[in-house]
Every structure is written in C-alpha cells, then in structure tokens.
Amino acid sequence: CSAVGCKLVGVDSGFIVDVPTLIANRPQSNVWLRAVKADAKDPQKCVAGFGGGSKSIGFNATYDSPSTGSRAVSINDTPISTTPTGSATEFTPLTLKFDAEASAPLTVSYSDAGRMNLNVRYAPTEGDERGLVMVAADQFVSKPYGIHIETDIDKRPANKRCNGATIDECREVFIAAGEPFPVRFRAVGWDGSDSEPRTAQALVDNIITPNFALSAVNGAFTLEQTLMAPADGDLGALS
C-alpha cells in the first residue's frame, strides 16, 4: 500500500464443510463447501469469503479409525490423496464453481468403512489472492450397507445359495440337529440401489469393506433364527 493514510484490514477466513455419515461405496451429494471470513465490522459474524466463480481447491483425507487403509476418498468422482493420520502432505487439486454466497456443492464417496478426516486447503500462488491460505477439516464416518452371511454347508454357487425364502430352497443344506456348522460374516458396501434387499443372495457380489470393525464396547451382532417348517415345530436354541 503506497497511498498516504492507506490502511490494511486483516480478517480470519477459512472454509466450512460438514460431511454426514456415509454408506460405504454410495456417493453422497449436496455436501456444501462454504468459504467464509469474519465480518470486518463484526468479527463474531461470518460472511462470504469471496465472490462467485471457479477456483482450484486442494483436498486430502487421512484414516482415523482404523489408522490405515487401502482405499481413497473421492470428491466429485475424483480420488483424492488418502494416507495414514499424520502423513498427509499432498493435496489433490479440484476445480470448483462457487456461487454468489461462496458455496460449492460436493459429492463425497468412500468405498470402505471407518472414521475418516477430510482436509481442505486453498493457497493461490498468483493473482490478487497470492499469499492467502484458507483451510478446513471435518471428520466423518462411513458404514457398511449390510452384513453378508454365508456358510460352507451350501456347496452351490454363491448366487444360488439358500436365502430362507422357501423350505425347498434349503433342502440341500440340511444337517443333523445339534451339529455345528461354520458361518462367515462380511461387511459390504452399497451396490447401486437403495432398495437392494439385505439377503445372502442379494449381497453376495457387493464390495467388501475390509476396514469395518465391531467391538464388544460398540455393540455386537445379534443372531436370530426363523422356523421355516413344520409350522407347529419347536424353534430350538441357537448358540
């Protein structure tokens, strides 16, 4: 500033973003990124951080719980840098179009389960905004779409196995009462339809979510059995 009596006014600025709980592998649209700054006349009030238009914004994500993983968070169909907590140094640039209120819509997707951190950074290196640094961070959870249950008793192809619809479908997998049998549980992600039934046949091809974990502290599976035949039979005990 070279004019006599020129004053420079500095205000705090940054972004606000709030990612809701995700369903693994299901894109979540209408997640808004807002650029804000403190009102110069009332620092307790936030106003639009800049005018509308396109800007290159940097994104990265880190694994929080569990602390490592193998899949990336995607923003607007673009995988962004996703690394263990404490190691994030690279930001993936994405061009976003902001409206007059300095808001830009995001579509967020993560194909695994767990708790994640999303980081946002805007640091232009040229033009009138050179030297400006605006950041934001948000933590979100991604959960499985369902739990696929299967047993090796049924030797038929996975998509033909008994799903309990009728007694005839399950005749090939009868075992003696009281005989133990192996069961596997797989946490799986969304597969393109919110109305997909959560049955063994429907979930067999859904993507696995390897980072899903369930402890006794957070809850546990509850197993229940259904008597299919005879109608007046004894339900029996499941252990």
Image (tube, rainbow, N blue to C red):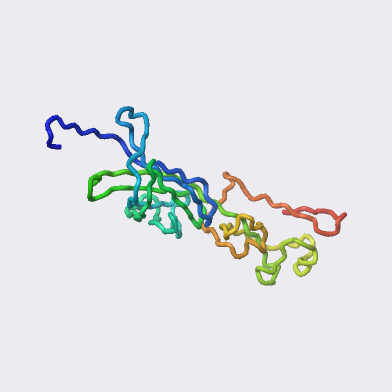
Q: Is residue 43 above or below residue 146?
A: above
Q: Quadrant of residue 193?
A: bottom right
Q: Residue at x 52, y 57 (%)?
A: 25
Along the viewing direction, whichever of 105 and 171 lies nearer the viewer: 105
Foreground pick, 196 / 65: 196
Left or right relative to 177: residue 24: left
Q: Nearer the viewer, residue 53 or 117?
A: 53
Q: Count numbered badges in the picture.
A: 0
User: Residue 105's x, y, as percent?
Assistant: 44, 48
Residue 51 figure quarter = top left
The image quadrant where one finds the N terminus is top left
Question: Is residue 58 left or right of 169 when viewed as pictured?
Answer: left
Q: Residue at x 33, y 27 (%)?
A: 42
Name the side, left or right, on which 149 lies relative to 91.
right
Depth check: give the residue in front, 3 or 205: 3
Q: Give above or below for 92 relative to 151.
A: above
Give the image quarter of residue 178: bottom right
Q: Residue furthest right?
A: 232
| Picture quarter with the C terminus | bottom right
Q: Residue furthest bottom?
A: 156
Q: What percent of the width, then of the height, locates residue 160?
A: 69, 69
Q: Work out whether 148 lies above or below 14.
A: below
Q: Position of residue 73 (x, y in %)?
A: 44, 55
Where does residue 46 sit, x and y in percent of width and height? 37, 34
Extreme residue in the top direction? 42
- What residue do we see at 86% from left, 56% from top? 231
On screen, residue 127 versus residue 155, left or right, reads: left
